[in-house]
Image (cartoon, grey):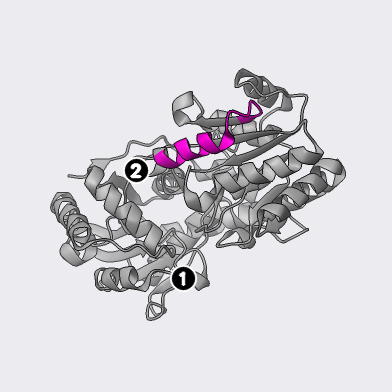
Amino acid sequence: MLQPVALAQKHLADYASIVGRPLVDEIRERAERLAGKRVLHVSATSFGGGVSEILSTLVPLMVDAGLSCEWHVIYGREEFFNATKLMHNALQGSDEDLSEEQWQTWLRYNEINARELSTDWDVCVIHDPQPAALASLVLEKARKWVWRCHIDLSTPNHATLERLRPYLDPYDASVFHMSQYVPAGMDGTAHIVPPAIDPLAPKNMAFSPEDAVYICQQFGIDIDRPLLCQVSRFDPWKDPLGVIDAYRLVTDEMPEVQLALVGSMATDDPEGWDYFNATVAHADGDPDIHIFNNLNNVGAIEVNAFQSHSDVVLQKSTREGFGLTVTEAIWKARPVIGGAVGGIPLQITDAETGFLVSTVDQCAQRALEILGDPALGNRLGRAGKEAVRRRFLMPRLLRDWLELFEYVEV
């Protein structure tokens, strides 16, 4: 069978003081109607990205709510993930489509995983394009099938999308972050469900300033000087090179500012190391540009410390399905500057809960405004945190999934 992911227990009751008792009561009521239903989530990897972070909390909360829920990870080798990374980029707008050989590689690995998929599920939730062919290959293994798309399909490479579309047709429902991501012709099955963060996870739990300072010092950060930080994969869509360019414009006026670029290297992202190396090269040995990844002992606690201690958190994406790192930073009441793309404007109301930018110059200018006016940063941070509390915490996501399961008559 596919590789099951072992998960820690989580309890919905622990979130009541954060999200409010009415939401928790609604979840319990919906869950009673679904008690014992067998739910399987299938994804490409168990660590290194937003999908795995969501599932590591969502699946245990589904179990706590009374569902029989599991999370399995597909099998794939480098040739498969090279093809699916190209597919991911094309679906987000890259001109380069997969070769015929790469399409066949994708399908062959889906066939392998289809054979290993266990059976008798009430609903099977397939995450993203990597295992998207499973429903068409073994429809009988689940009563209902849901495709969950975590990427921005607003301006896809049409050749790639059209080649993928027949494999999406068997799904009973599809789920997108935003209505703008729903391809033409899929409106009838589409549901809009933005993602969410776990406020009790080590990456997001309340952190004392002293603890954040201590951890940042261990990584060579001068805690007495201003810090800009971006937390994201090393990926061209996240534009770490543009972040470095913006930092350089900031230091033309405030030379004491430092930059930290923090990212994780995921098994399903073979381009990650190439872009990590390109980012290091673009930094050109600047001792005030600190570049870290999860292989430098930077895990969830360290990310929390960097975000909590930063004077400004950046997410200068040029494409972004949603941007959970934006949500994480806003939840810590930090002022955030994000690219005006994808799901980031869902989270940031410009000049109210953060700033939205489209260019390097705009990013640098907004950073200078915040650095020069700490009261502005505090105001943006407080307003943003309350917006996240209302809209982007994990119990709301659990409620939305239960509602979807009822809709497809699981």
Query: Which residue: 39% across, 65% down?
Result: 95
Q: Can residue 17 be seen here?
A: no
Q: Residue visible at 78% across and 24% down?
A: 224
Gap in Å between the C-alphas at discs 1 and 2?
23 Å
Q: Nearer the viewer, residue 318 or 396?
A: 318
Can residue 23 be spotted in the picture? yes
- Amino acid, disc 2: Pro
**Residue 72, position as x, y percentages in the image:** 28, 46
Q: From the viewer's perspective, is residue 97 above or below residue 386?
A: below
* Towards the viewer: 294 or 199: 294
Q: Position of residue 137 (x, y in %)?
A: 16, 63
Mainly helix, strand or loop, the magenta region? helix
Q: Quadrant of the C terminus?
A: bottom left
Identify which residue, 95 or 291, lies in the foreground.
95
The quarter of the picture where residue 221 lies is top right
The quarter of the picture where the N terminus appears is: top left
- Residue placed under numbered mark 1 in the picture: 155
Label 2: element kind: loop
Which region of the structure is painted magenta? 274-289
Secondary structure, mark 1, is loop
Q: What amino acid is found at the position of numbered circle 1 in the picture?
A: Thr
Q: Position of residue 245 (x, y in %)?
A: 64, 45
Would residue 281 be counted in the magenta stretch? Answer: yes
Based on the displayed image, in which of its 4 quarters is residue 37 positioned?
A: bottom left
* Left or right of 52, for residue 374: right
Which residue was labeled with disc 2?
Answer: 270
Magenta stretch: includes residue 311: no
**In the displayed structure image, the side of residue 143 where residue 312 appears, left or right:** right
Which residue is drawn at the image coordinates 48% and 25% (left, top)? 296
Nearer the N terminus, badge 1 or badge 2? 1
